[in-house]
Image (cartoon, helix red, strand yellow):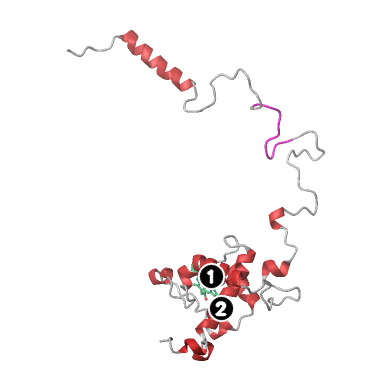
Amino acid sequence: MKWTAPRPAAALLLLMSALLGGCSNFPSRQPPIWVWWDMKKQDKYKPQAESAFFADGRASRPPVAGTVAQELYRPDRAFSTGIAPDGNYVAQNPLPITKETLVQGQRKFDIYCAPCHDRTGSGRGIVPAKAVWVPGNLHDERIVNFVDGELFHVITNGRRSMPGYRFQISEKDRWAIVAYIRALQRSWRGTMADVPPELQSRVR
Ligand code: HEC
């Protein structure tokens, strides 16, 4: 069959329907004509708008003085910062050092710390293997001598080239990681005397 050029009227129709299609706001799911507005249009203030109702003319009201966002409410500052009221690092982990605490600490350490510090804490994780980045060896005498609050503080705020993890790891989990680091450090310094006598012959 021979191709024939479309007649001008058909071409016009096509063009008009394409233009009308544009008017329907496609692909919006809103109907092009709103018969019932429901609550889609209503009197309201947009952020930063003006209002004659309030004396200062601002529609956005400041919170009542002394308001604290729930997620920023920290009744126990030592627990959330690792710094005691006297300004020193908290000496002792406030969590009970139980098996649950250590297991949770291990879980979180392996997720958040092991990529750089590796699972033993010696600092040979996969990140430093691929980049020029030298994480501290958590078994260094200097770090073993940190009090618990200083470890917590390093996890929370980072130190030098180490990033802080306060947004990723909850306070409780950070303290659990501190407990687990203590276990790692203890195991690193273990001697044959720490192995129960009946198991010593099996250690190689
Ligand atoms: C992205 C890599 C990275 C991750 C992940 C990381 N660290 Fe570090 N960390 C470093 C680096 C790098 C240093 C050395 C910082 C320096 O001295 O410049 C360091 C140092 C430290 C130190 C010693 C600080 C000092 O005073 O020398 C501690 C303690 C520590 N990290 C604990 C942790 C713990 C606990 C985690 C998991 C919550 C963690 N780090 C996760 C990279 C990392």
Cα separation, mark 2 vs mark 1, equals 9 Å
Q: Are marks 2 and 1 in contact (CB under 8 Å)?
A: yes
Label 1, residues with CA under 10 Å away: few <14, some 14-19, many ≥20? many
Q: Residue at x 58, y 78 (%)?
A: 182
In the displayed structure, 165 sits above or below 141; it is: above
As helix, strand or loop, the secondary structure at mark 1 comes to helix
Tell me the residue at 80%/52% (across/down).
65
Q: What residue sits 69% from the left and 27% below the top?
A: 42
Which residue is the extreme one toward the front? 198
Q: Is residue 183 left or right of residue 55?
A: left
Left or right relative to 157: residue 201: left
Residue picked out by circle 2: 183
Work out which quarter of the rendered image holds the N terminus and state it. Answer: top left
117 inside magenta stretch: no
Q: Identify which residue, 170 or 21, lies in the foreground.
A: 170
Amino acid identity at mark 1: Gln
Q: Residue sitting at 75 percent across and 39 percent down? A: 58
Which label number is shown at residue 161? none
Boundaries of the magenta span: 41-50
Q: Residues within 10 Å of mark 2 (few under 14, many from 20)?
A: some
Which residue is tagged 1?
A: 106
Task: Give the left or right position of residue 171, taking residue 194 as reference.
Answer: right
The one of 64 and 187 positioned closer to us in this rendering: 187
